[in-house]
């Protein structure tokens, strides 16, 4: 999975590009948190713009749980998403999106 930061970082973008390239080369599933958190992800970080705040942690957890759910469904297995996380705004289990 890619690693987002609350500030623009050339080295972070390069690091994430390598992660994307390896995932594509290895045909591995990728959770692109840099993309998923949007172009202005500061809402998800503490003041240091490195560590996730509570809302950011919940969003990342929901995104990861949603990807796991989709993967299991695609492989013919089922999972109850309520076991993974509760339905609380601003997250939607229906489409696994973040209301920004």
Image: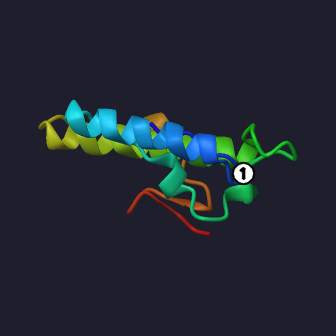
Residue at image coords 55%, 47%: 13
Residue at image coords 57%, 62%: 38
Residue nearer the viewer, 72 or 9 = 9
Residue 61: % across, % down: 55, 39
Residue at image coords 78%, 46%: 49
Residue 94: % across, % down: 39, 62
Give the position of the N terminus as an image quadrant.
top left
Q: Which residue is mark 1?
A: 6
| Quarter of the view holding residue 89 | bottom right
In the figure, 84 relative to 47: above or below? above
Residue 32: % across, % down: 44, 47
Q: In the figure, is residue 11 to the left or right of 68? A: right
Give the position of the C terminus as an image quadrant.
bottom right
Q: In the figure, is residue 92 to the left or right of 41? A: left
Residue nearer the viewer, 9 or 23 = 9
| Quarter of the view holding residue 51 | top right
């Amino acid at each position: 999975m890619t690693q987002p930061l609350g500030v623009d970082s050339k080295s972070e973008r390069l690091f994430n590009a390598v992660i994307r390239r390896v995932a594509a080369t290895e045909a591995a599933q990728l959770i692109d948190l840099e993309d998923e958190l949007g172009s202005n992800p500061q809402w998800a970080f503490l003041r240091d713009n490195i560590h996730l705040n509570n809302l950011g942690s919940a969003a990342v957890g929901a995104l990861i749980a949603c990807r796991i759910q989709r993967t299991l469904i695609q492989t013919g297995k089922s999972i109850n998403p309520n076991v993974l996380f509760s339905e609380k705004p601003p997250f939607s289990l229906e489409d696994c999106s973040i209301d920004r």
